[in-house]
Amino acid sequence: MTIFAAIGLLYIYGPNFNVYLWPPSAERYGMNALDKLNKYGYFSDTDNWKSQYQNAAKEMKSVKNYNQADIVLKKVVSHAGGKHSKIVTTQETKKQQHYEDPEFRFEDSLLIIHEPQFTGNANQANNYANKINSYIFKHKHEIKGVILDLSNNNGGDMAPMILGISSLIPDGNIFSFIFPNSNTEKIILDKGSLNAGEGTVSLKNHGKINNVKIAVIINKMTASSGEFTALAIKSSSRVKFFGENSAGYTSVNQSFPLYSGTTINLTVGGVKDITNKEYFNTPITPDVRTNEPYKLASQWISSQNE
């Protein structure tokens, strides 16, 4: 292959991998992004999306810069992927990057864990998961029940959330991603590792704590990876959910970086729990609907241990 042929191929196919020989025009930048929505979006085969795509393509002909193209993309992304899909600019990404430590305490043989959202870096992912994992093993001989509080956990990277509590979850298939082409991807927990998620986590303890009652607290702010964490714990045999319906962002997003630094977070699939119940932006419903989840969860665990 000559160097000129290689350059030609790079010009044609490079944008598929966000590689350009020189900065794309605003129109080309926008059309490349629209084509990703058109190729991968969960609803890209619908008449509604086809109409939205045509209108957006017309608007892209008059955009003067990447910011204007992003505005057009923001108007149509949910039509391609649903409510969980977003266009996130560099500035918005910086605002979203926020690390909160998990919280835990041990009271009268009851382990209480609060897992907040996770949007940190790899080191923070490792720290997040191991803090929970180490605390569980510190008290493993004393634990008679667990309250896992996922209220207000609106997502991020699910790997540190799930791996932090992996000692409470049996190894194996914890849920599955399902796609429009009928393909299914099983999400597998195996000896402290997970075949999905972005964080790099190396757990210190890989053992399991069995036969413990687990009460899971969810609310209307439990979303996305927070909901996936709730579905993962469902694979444990002694679990009950308390609180209110979750937010209903139970769908799989794939990220596509654009030349400007903006990212497309596009919904490409749904999820199926271990009972084969399918979710697509469907709320998780609690077993006990209550405004006093801690109180009723504690009572349930106590009654089971008497």
Image (tube, rainbow, N blue to C red):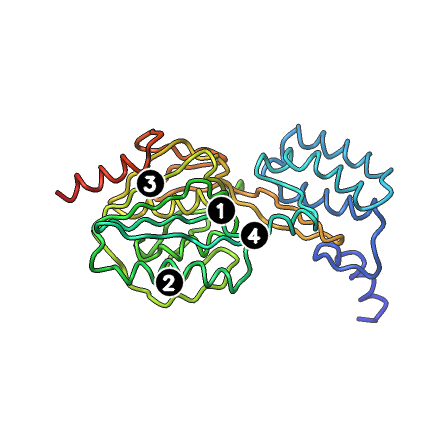
Q: Image height check: is 49 above or below 171?
A: above
Looking at the rendered image, the quarter that the N terminus falls into is: bottom right
In the image: residue 262, left or right of residue 224: right
**Depth check, front residue: 125 or 30:** 125
Q: Distance between the residues labelled 1 and 4?
A: 34 Å
The image shows residue 171 at horizontal and vertical percentages of 32, 57
Name the residue carrying label 4: 98
Q: Which of marks 1 and 3 is in front?
A: 3
Above or below for 197 versus 224: below
Give the residue at the far bottom of this rendering.
2
> Which x, y percent locates residue 93?
65, 50
Q: Name the residue under label 2.
A: 192
Answer whether labels 1 and 3 touch (C-beta < 8 Å).
Answer: no
Residue at the extreme left:
306
Q: Is mark 4 on a helix, strand or loop?
A: loop
Which mark sits nearer the N-terminus, 1 or 3? 1
N-terminal-most mark, 1 or 4 = 4
Q: What residue type is labelled 1?
A: Asn
- Which residue is rendered at x = 52% and y = 42% of the image? 269
Label 3 SS? loop
Mark 3 residue crowding within 10 angstroms, few (<14) / some (14–19) / many (20+): few
Disc tally is 4
Query: As drawn, is 183 to the left or to the right of 94?
Result: left
Where residue 132 appears, as percent x and y from the top left, is 37, 58
Look at the numbered disc 2 and give the secondary structure of its residue: loop
**Disc 1 target residue:** 183
N-term-proximal mark, 1 vs 2? 1
Q: Name the residue under label 3.
A: 275
Amino acid type at image mark 2: Gly
Q: Which residue is drawn at 33% across and 35% down?
A: 293
Residue drawn where x is 70% and y is 51% of the image: 90
| Mark toward the start of the polypeptide (4 vs 2) | 4
